[in-house]
Image (cartoon, grey):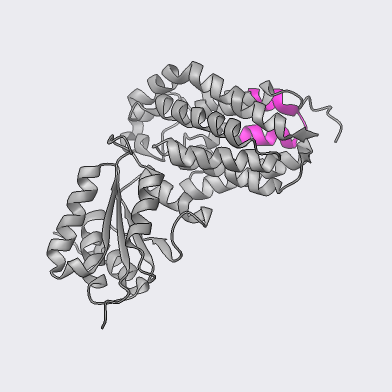
Amino acid sequence: MSLDKPVGIVLVSHSAAVATAVAELARGLAGGGDAVPVAAAGGTEGGGVGTSAELIAAAAAAVDRGAGVALLADLGSSVLTVKALIAEGDELPEGARLVDAPFVEGAVAAVVTAATGADLDAVEAAAGEAYGYRKV
Amino acid sequence: MLDADHFRRWMTATAASVDREAERLTALDSPIGDADHGSNLRRGFRAVTAALEKEAPDTPGAVLVLAGRQLISTVGGASGPLYGTLLRRTGKALGDAAEVSEEQFTQALRTGVDAVMQLGGAAPGDKTMIDALVPAVDALDAGLGFGAAATAAEQGAEATTPLQARKGRASYLGERSIGHQDPGATSAALLVAGLAEAGAGTGADPV
């Protein structure tokens, strides 16, 4: 499958360090993950702990290749801000979607799946399935 | 009838009271939250008044949509998308009429509150802003006017003290969230009080 139009992935966390590190981890574990556009949107614009609608919108625009954008969020205001932006209708690229998934495991699954050239539905399903990987 | 100026005054009055009460909101947010509610909302409502001054929207709906958008992009905490959605949905429901009746506003506000409940998944009794907003809309619905709505919101906020939080960060505390007034319900009461400060809404207002 061609990666002419890969699904974009945005990782939204309260912390810039968390979002950036998880993006790096997912890319690293994906091998060839460089073909998938992944962007981190962590913390506030001022570098504090929180959520920035502007950073999220910029990250989503940066990874949009026309095949949709999967957004993964950690908790609280990250989730609510993404939902509010999607409800707005014009602040995120067309086909942007909040994916219900555990943040770290879901990010890895999403990037690995997107790297195979899968579409947004498949990326969303793979990320969501990460909830089912029990550890004990 | 309520015009764009009324809604501008509402936002300005709320910005002033949020500014005045920011320390109290943050203090309430310290035992059961992350101690940023006052400063977050102060930043948000300052952005709202600045944007309203700059863009001067000329309908009630446009004032609220612009205010909501500002809150979503500047608050930085969960109250941003929640209050932003409240104002934006209320504004969208008002359409592009130059003036709206109290009754139309009440219906629109109900739509906004429903959207907040859907976004956050909170219901009355979960110790959230909904516990102040729903009694306020009910008071307006009963034709009691903005003053009575403000009282209802204030009482709703006070009534969150014995509740156990079921939403947001405070819910992690379980029973330890009992005994603290909810900061979100408290700021929601300020928002409704701003409506009363903006004037009109005596309940006897001709529609």
Task: Point out residue A110 in the picture as x, y percentages from the top left corner.
Answer: 26, 66
In this view, the residue farthest toward the front is: B54
Task: Point out residue B51 in the picture as x, y percentages from the top left corner.
Answer: 55, 34
Q: Would you say the magenta stretch is mainly helix, strand or loop? A: helix
Q: For this view, does B146 lie left or right of residue B54?
A: right
> On the image, which quarter does residue A42 sit in?
top left
Number of callouts = 0
Task: Point out residue B170 in the picture as x, y percentages from the top left corner.
Answer: 36, 34
The correct choice, above or below, for B87 with respect to A127 in the image is above
Q: Nearer the viewer, residue A35 or B77?
A: A35
Magenta segment includes A21: no
- For the point 26% across and 54% down, the residue is A103
Q: Nearer the viewer, residue A13 or B190?
A: A13
Quarter of the image for the N terminus of chain B: give it. top right
In this view, the residue farthest toward the right is: B206
Q: For this view, does A51 lie left or right of residue A91?
A: left
Q: For this view, does A84 lie left or right of residue B89?
A: left
The correct choice, above or below, for A119 with respect to B115 in the image is below
Quarter of the image for the C terminus of chain B: give it. top right
- For the point 52% across and 50% down, the residue is B118
The stretch of residues the image draws in magenta is B134-151
Q: From where the camera sits, is residue A117 visible? A: yes
> On the image, which quarter does residue B7 sit in?
top right
Q: For this view, does B53 lie left or right of residue B2?
A: left
- For the point 17% across and 50% down, the residue is A21
Q: Nearer the viewer, residue B192 or B166?
A: B192
Task: Point out residue B29 in the picture as x, y percentages from the top left corner.
Answer: 38, 26
Q: From where the camera sits, is residue B121 visible? A: no
